[in-house]
Amino acid sequence: MPANSSLNTALSHPKTHQKVVVGMSGGVDSSVAAWLLKQQGYEVIGLFMKNWEDDDDDEYCSSRQDWLDVVSVADLIGIDVEAVNFAAEYRERVFADFLREYAAGRTPNPDVLCNAEIKFKAFLDHAMSLGADLIATGHYARIQHGDGQVQLLKALDASKDQSYFLHRLNQAQLSHVLFPLGELQKSVVRTIAADIGLPNATKKDSTGICFIGERPFREFLNRYLPRTPGLICSTDGKALGEHMGLAFFTLGQRKGIGIGGSQDSTGDAWYVARKDMASNTLFVAQGHDHPWLFSRDLLAIDASWVAGVVPTGQNTYAAKTRYRQIDAPCSLIANVITPNRFDLHFSENQWAVTPGQSAVLYAGEVCLGGGIIAAATFR
């Protein structure tokens, strides 16, 4: 194994006599996480979660191969592994909300809810029933204990940081969690996987929403949501075509609108700018920098704060309104009387702030929590 300071940090301070149940997906990250914990002296048990079974076939759903990869990895590193089916919980707690949000014209992020309700709730409960002291996953994030609180921190590898998806975790959940990869660069994780001979060392990272996989997104939604055709209009009210249903479009979308030939002298591409649910009208704007695509303020609801209370004590924070967005400086307007909602005012215009997505608040490296975007004030 090549010398590496971040790897040495991950392997330091070995623990003994503590049982850790590791969520193993069949991917490289969770596999290396399990190996690291075994090297640190934990009693490690692998657990494979099956969260989707409506169309469990090999064309789009890789769960069968993923399970085989988990078994192979567990055998190599010398740990026991079991599979548990959370499909009923997933359908009730995550997928039902996903469909409701799309039907209402919003664009939800089911991975955020999956982490809060399945991976760190149903999974955590199951692990505790097995006598676990802790659970662990292959997420890229860090945890810091101190002053009677647990803080959620960004991963050291900024390009892989997943704290955005974990912002709804609370103190009770985080107090039982380990993120072994939080101190590592992704390149180091890949190197470890190759050096120890993991059978999935070259496996590609999964992308997209877990239950959709690689299948066409609109095709998937068509199976669950009805088509409700309506007009597509420009920002000045000119009818440009017809859409199949507002649920099938999201703000900032450029491809697949269906009006490729409708353009003015600029020749710029069209972008989804607004969705008027009352009139069932899809408004599109021409050009990436059209004013309708920008906003400075947003209202978020269903807030969840990692510390359990509304953040205070700072004038300026930073926020992401979508994953992989660069942190944007902002001010928080919150009310301790109604801690489940807050407003953010950004220092600069934000592009395509999308209702249904998560607005996640940060103080430096610390993820404070966030909420679901309900509305944005356009420029």
Image (cartoon, rainbow, N blue to C red):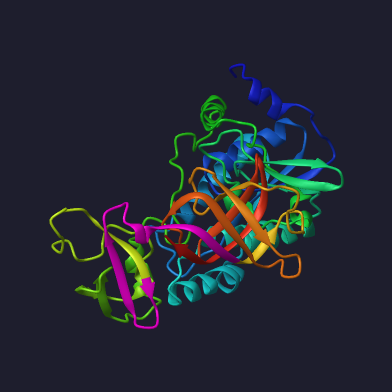
Residue 32: image quadrant is top right
Residue 72: image quadrant is top right
Q: Quadrant of the C terminus?
A: bottom left
Name the residue at 38% across, 64% down.
Answer: 250
- Left or right of 179, for residue 347: left
Instruction: Judge whether residue 290 is colored magenta.
Output: yes
Q: Quadrant of the N terminus?
A: top right
Residue 59 visible at all = no
Which of 282 and 99 lies nearest the eye of the viewer?
A: 282
Give x and y (percent) for residue 281: 31, 77
Which of 289 and 184 lies nearest the eye of the viewer?
A: 289
Residue 186 visible at all = yes
Which of 152 and 355 lies nearest the eye of the viewer?
A: 355
Which of 47 and 240 lies nearest the eye of the viewer?
A: 240
Name the residue at 30% across, 70% down.
Answer: 283
Which region shows up in magenta? 275-300
- Left or right of 254, for residue 5: right
Name the residue at 51% across, 48% down.
Answer: 68
Give x and y (percent) for residue 16: 83, 35
